Amino acid sequence: MTKIDTSRPETVLPTPSHTVGPFYGHALPFPGGGDIAPVGHPDTLVLQGHVTDGEGNPLPDAFLELWGADPDGNVPRVDGSIRRDPATGGYLGRNGVEFTGWGRVQTDANGHWSARTLRPGARGRSAPYISVCVFARGLLVHLYTRIYLPDDEAVLAADPLLARVPEERRDTLIARRQGDGTYRFDIRLQGEGETVFLEFQ
């Protein structure tokens, strides 16, 4: 059996945890990824916030995917709204017409993200929410959470998922109103104030 000298970095072979990304910068971001709402729609709102690690440091290379119902609570079933340049095949951005309910954004150097979408309507007994999937360095498995809007406390109180979350942690799932149709939702991956993440089975 061959022994490997682990006292020197140059003699240690990479393991999956060393080679995992994120490798988002090459192909995944595209123009208009966060422009989910059709241009000029009256139910448009802006979601923005920061993604931070367990020590509160911003993550400049996190990646979020968002899904949301339309204002009537219906899950969109239209074809994609992304346009490509017929000559180069490159992304031109969204067509500004269809609402697919889906967006993809990357954090900037300060860990900040932003998306413009439609205010989701309630579905069944659930309060209106937007689903979020978080990809970031050090995560071998992506994380799921929800963004609830703080517009109706009675509706939030009746939500079956929020009712199962300890009261002291519920606010990590509820965006804060900033004014002018803007809401702030920060995502903390670990530590004090850690965002509640969901496990689907």
Image (cartoon, rainbow, N blue to C red):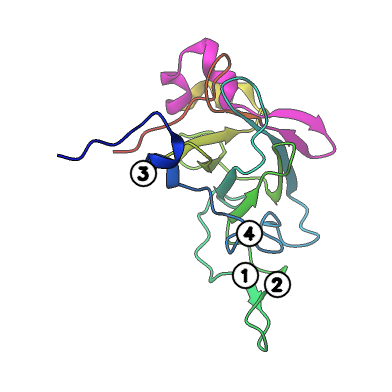
Question: Circle 3 is placed at which residue position?
Answer: 13
Q: Nearer the viewer, mark 4 or mark 1?
A: 4
Would you say the residues marked 2 and 3 are in contact, meaning their CB atoms lie under 8 Å apart? no
**Which callout, 2 or 3, points at the residue further toward the start of the chain?**
3
Question: Circle 2 is placed at which residue position?
Answer: 95
Residue type, label 4: Pro
**Magenta-highlighted residues:** 160-185
Q: Nearer the viewer, mark 4 or mark 3?
A: 3
| 130 over 100 or under it: above or below | above
Q: Secondary structure at mark 2?
A: loop
Work out whether residue 141 can be spotted.
Answer: no
Q: CA distance from mark 1 to mark 2?
A: 6 Å
Question: Circle 1 is placed at which residue position?
Answer: 81
Is 170 placed left or right of 36 in the picture?
left
Q: CA distance from mark 4 to mark 1?
A: 15 Å
Question: Circle 4 is placed at which residue position?
Answer: 29
Would you say the residues marked 1 and 2 are in contact, meaning their CB atoms lie under 8 Å apart? yes
| 130 over 159 or under it: above or below | below
Q: CA distance from mark 4 to mark 2?
A: 17 Å
Give the position of the N terminus as an image quadrant: top left
Please tell me the numbered disc located at residue 37: none
**Which callout, 4 or 1, points at the residue further toward the start of the chain?**
4
